Amino acid sequence: MNSILEERDISVNEKMETDQVNNNESNADYSNIYPKDSKTFKNMSLNEMTMNLSKFEDNEADADLLKIYTHDLQMYKDPPTGQISLEKFEKLGAQRLEVLRIIDRLSKQVEIKYEDMKECLLSGLKQKGLEYYVRLIKSPGSDTNSAADIEMRRRDHISHFILRLALCRNQKTLDWFINLEQRLFWIRFASLNDPGIENFLALYNFDYPTLSEEQKNEHRENLIAVHDNIDVDKTVIYKVPYLRARKLVKDRKIFLHRGFVFVPRTEMIHVTTQAFKEFLKAQINVISIKAIRNESRLEPILKNLFTFTDTVILPEITSIPLDSLDELAEKSYPLCMKIMHEALRKVHHLKNGARLQYGVFLKLIGISYDCQVDFFKEEFLKTMDICTFENSYLYYIQHIYGKVGRRIEYKTFSCKPIIESKVGFGEYHGCPYKNMTEETLRSNLKKLGIEEEGIEEIEDLAKDQRYREACTKCFHLRYQTPLNELIESPSTFFFKSQNIVLRERRLKEKKEKERLEKEKIDKEKAFLATLENADISNLELSNWEL
């Protein structure tokens, strides 16, 4: 394999323009952000891309490699070149993916402050044995350039591009990758010392002028007002175009003067992180996957990394409080989930199949892991002790959220496995249109408010084994809203019904608001009419509200 990556026939500036139109980014040009005196990959011949990665195990740092890897923090401008074993390729990709997953989990734990993220991340990396990432994250920048430093930087470089290749297959995984790489960049930049920051800014052409003593004195009052924790005289302050520091401007944490912001060195993390994310978005499709076209052995590895990542990423769902479940079960649950919910409330227990189906459903509609544990614990402890619950039943909830077993979180649970599941005596899972007797199904449909004619239609569909059509018909009659497609899963039913319920609620609130407005206007008109008809000559001043 001569080269891992090859340039697509598009320049950086052309791609930047495309991305800026598609993503509404600023007009900032980051085409100059790459090491000075380095060759761009578009001018690099294949003969120059023949370095063997095995040399990085040598005790002495290679002089040519030192020119490429002069700093522990990178912008990942050029793709890596050379040869690498499939085993190492897969290992590096999996390790970096684990790093991003740890950051992702930490970022979703609201009790962890952002400034504590670094220590939590380091602890997680040590537990996973990812020591060289620990070194990278703690690195002050470029204080040393040993063979071990060069190897560490090279691994960082390669692993980034492996995931870039693997996760660029759809927008969801791509966005996930970019956001978490940005977080990782932030954490690493925050570890740099002053020389490390200066070297990084110089290396990647952040050529912003610094304020002179005269300029500091001119703006001293404003600088102190904004940055009361710094010594203006001793701090290096950069003059940066305001579009390069949008977050600081948005949060009003910076002094803005004639289109420029005055950024202390300690705040340059905002400027570089913004540049990193925008540059990464612009560069993400500049490369094409020549290795996949010419080397079929790479495809399974990249596909596995993509599939694993795509499986664990869930859409953002508004959290649902536990005390609203009974109301939701009544208004928006499909019949299959409503039956299990009512059974759990009544008998305080569900067998394996029902716990799995209902547990996955609760997760998909927005119930967090801790809330689901509390929910099942509240019911189960009415018939057993805490030890029995934790030893025999907690595992299923952990499995659903990817905390044990294969550690793959459920993204969906469609109607097909529910219809095909076997249901025994005393079990409440499965599809009610398939498993219920005609009398029991009729009784449950009546509770949903469905008229006799509609019940007969649903029963006919169920008899013909058209169970999804029966569920879709139930939705139509229950909410007086026909669907253009069949119900695919219980969560699909729930979200569609919630859209209708919330729309009706908004309409009701709007009508109530209009009624109150009309009532207010009518009262004002009545009051004015009273004044017109009254004999005001005899009214005393004290009767008027001034």
Image (cartoon, helix red, strand yellow):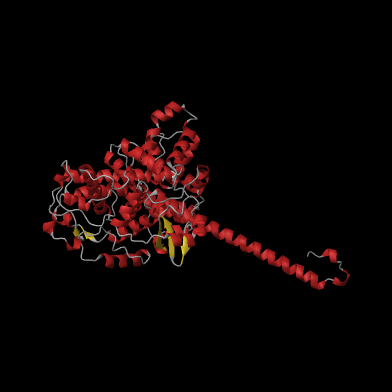
Q: Which of 378 and 52 is in front in this view?
A: 52
Instruction: Give how far across and how far down residue 78 sits, in percent.
Output: 23, 57
Q: Which of 484 and 226 is in front in this view?
A: 226
**The C terminus is located in which quarter?**
bottom right
Q: In this view, does 95 lie above or below 508?
A: above
Q: Can residue 52 be seen in this view?
A: yes
Q: In this view, does 150 lie to the left or right of 452?
A: left
Q: Residue at x 30, y 53 (%)?
A: 199
Instruction: Give how far across and how far down residue 74 sits, in percent.
Output: 28, 52
Q: In this view, does 169 lie to the left or right of 347?
A: left
Q: In this view, does 231 lie to the left or right of 353?
A: right
Instruction: Give how far across and how far down residue 287 sits, in percent.
Output: 22, 59
Q: In this view, does 544 lie to the left or right of 265?
A: right
Q: How many labels does the image show?
A: 0
Residue at the limit of the structure toward the right, as seen here: 538
Q: Is residue 531 above or below residue 125?
A: below
Residue at the limit of the structure toward the left, as seen here: 47
Q: Is residue 107 above or below residue 175?
A: above
Instruction: Give how far across and how far down residue 123 sits, in percent.
Output: 35, 37
Q: Nearer the viewer, residue 37 or 284?
A: 37
Q: Residue at x 21, y 53 (%)?
A: 68
Q: Can residue 362 be seen in this view?
A: no
Q: Which residue is drawn at 50% across and 55% down?
A: 224
